Image (cartoon, rainbow, N blue to C red):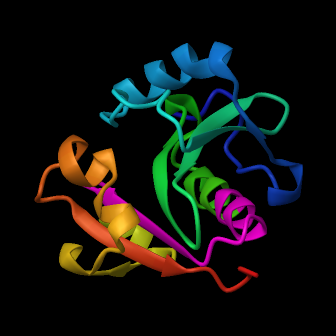
């Protein structure tokens, strides 16, 4: 099935990442739940979620925490926009946002997308090596199973 919005990914320069407000959380939760991603702690402090669009909604992604180590949260591309390279484009945009905030390393847990993230420069790591701020997150302590892959990426553009 071809995506409803065309078969090519928009140029990264056409994409925007806009921090979402509380009124956008229902839409975010709907798409995250549909993708099997955690939604229980979306409104907790320390989470910054972005709506990614190029005139129309493409997906969402979040960054959690403070300091040089942050958790990449809930990257999701809408179902009718998948399979055209948008996951990579959305990830690059969110990594740029993180780097602009001074983030040096992005961490993530995944049960389904480890292969994708490895192709984007994320490396497997032992959960025991996670910084305390990451290891204390809800994703590490209760939302993601112990079997989830833990991956880390050093952001080359972090200041």
- For the point 52% across and 55% down, the residue is 65
Range shown magenta: 93-113
**Numbered marks: total:** 0
103 drawn magenta: yes
Left or right relative to 46: residue 129: left
Question: In this image, 69 relative to 155: left or right?
Answer: left
Q: Is residue 3 left or right of residue 72?
A: right
Q: Is residue 15 visible?
A: yes
Q: Magenta stretch containing residue 120, yes or no?
A: no
Query: Residue 131: x, y in percent?
Result: 36, 74
Quarter of the figure with residue 142:
top left
Residue 61 x, y percent position in the rendering:
57, 45
Residue 69 appears at what percent x and percent y? Answer: 51, 70
The residue under the point 11% across, 57% down is 146
Q: Quadrant of the C terminus?
A: bottom right
As drawn, 15 above or below 99: above
Residue depicted at x 66% and y 36%: 58
Q: Residue 115 lies in what quarter of the image?
A: bottom left
Q: Is residue 133 above or below residue 126?
A: above
For image coordinates 82% across by 56% down, the residue present is: 11
In the displayed structure image, the side of residue 127 where residue 43 appears, left or right: right
**Residue 101, percent from left and from top:** 74, 64
Residue 26 sits above or below residue 86 on the image: above
Residue 155 quadrant? bottom right
Q: Nearer the viewer, residue 82 or 126?
A: 126
71, 31: nearer the viewer: 71
Q: Can I make out residue 118 in this image?
A: no
């Amino acid at each position: 099935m071809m995506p409803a919005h065309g078969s090519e990914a928009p140029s990264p320069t056409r994409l925007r990442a806009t921090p979402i407000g509380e009124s956008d959380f229902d839409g975010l939760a709907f798409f995250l739940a549909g993708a099997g991603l955690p939604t229980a702690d979306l409104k907790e402090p320390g989470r910054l979620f972005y709506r990614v669009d190029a005139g129309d909604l493409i997906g969402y992604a979040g960054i959690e925490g403070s300091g040089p180590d942050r958790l990449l949260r809930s990257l999701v591309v809408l179902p009718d926009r998948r399979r055209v390279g948008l996951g990579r484009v959305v990830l690059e945009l969110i990594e740029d946002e993180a780097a602009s905030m001074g983030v040096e390393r992005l961490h993530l847990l995944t049960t389904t997308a480890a292969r994708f993230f490895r192709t984007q420069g994320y490396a497997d790591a032992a959960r025991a090596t996670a910084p305390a701020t990451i290891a204390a997150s809800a994703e590490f302590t209760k939302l993601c199973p112990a079997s989830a892959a833990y991956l880390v990426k050093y952001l080359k553009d972090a200041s």
